Image: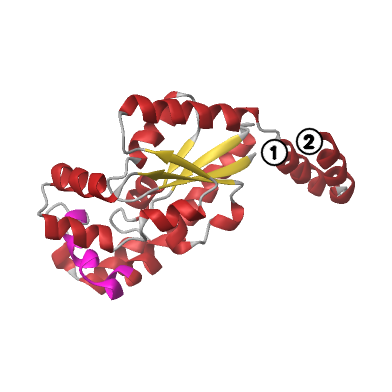
Amino acid sequence: MFLVGLTGGIASGKSTVSSQLKELGCPVIDADVVARKVVEPQSPAFRLIEQHFGREILLDNGEIDRQKLGQIIFSSPEKRKLLNSITHPEIHKEMFKQILLYFLKGYRYVILDVPLLFETRRLTRFLTHTVVVYCDPATQLSRLMQRDGLSQEEAEQRIGAQMPLKEKRGLASHVIENSGSREDTHRQVLRLHTKLEDSMEFLVVRAVAVAAVAGLGGLFLCTVRLLVS
């Protein structure tokens, strides 16, 4: 099994692409879903967030008010860095647990849906492919303002808090252009899906894992590389 990183920018359409891949039967681990899980009340990350940000970021039911916390971190790089240092290690541990489960089930690859994939770079060394969902700046700004009911200044502040999409595009091995219609995006997703399904790279990873258990790593790696070259 090999790993594919999926990322983008706020309001670039990453969630749309992730949903389309799921509909095609691709296993997707969503870092945002995992992030909500690891900050559930009384979890280690929850207690640290409460300690550093105060009880004013909690809802009446005791859960974290994500909107209020978001306002804090988008206006303060230092607070954003602090929150990431608390949550990212816990998110990555949970993601690796899920990756292991997919591996044991025999999947060829798993897609990791990670908004800050290139910002943190903690996962990139484990990835065989990286995919960026891109849209032009004007489209991104318009979508964000409409989606979240933000003013132009608020939307620009949130976009500016992330790595520019143009820079992410240059780092990716695949780009989904999402400035146009949903149908056009879907056609690109289908092409990516076909390419991943036809890839033989999962054989290398699986053979090395099996060979490591058997103590024959070097021999198996050479054999598999000959088969897929």
Residue pictured at 69% horizontal, 38% vertical: 201
- Residue 67 is labelled as none
Viewer can see residue 183: yes
Q: How is the image coloured?
A: secondary structure
Asked if the magenta segment contains residue 72, the reply would be: yes
- Quadrant location of the C terminus in the rendered image: top right
Where residue 165 appears, as percent x and y from the top left, is: 37, 53
- Quarter of the image where one finds residue 53: bottom left
Where residue 89 appears, as percent x and y from the top left, is: 46, 62
- Specify the segment rendered in magenta: 66-80
Above or below: residue 199 compared with residue 144 = above
Residue pictured at 31% horizontal, 61% vertical: 46
Report helix, strand or loop for mark 1: helix
Given the image, on which type of amino acid does mark 1 rest?
A: Glu
Residue bearing mark 2? 228
- Residue 201 is labelled as 1
Q: Is the magenta stretch mostly helix, strand or loop?
A: helix
Lower position in the chain sequence, tag 1 or tag 2: 1
Viewer can see residue 116: no
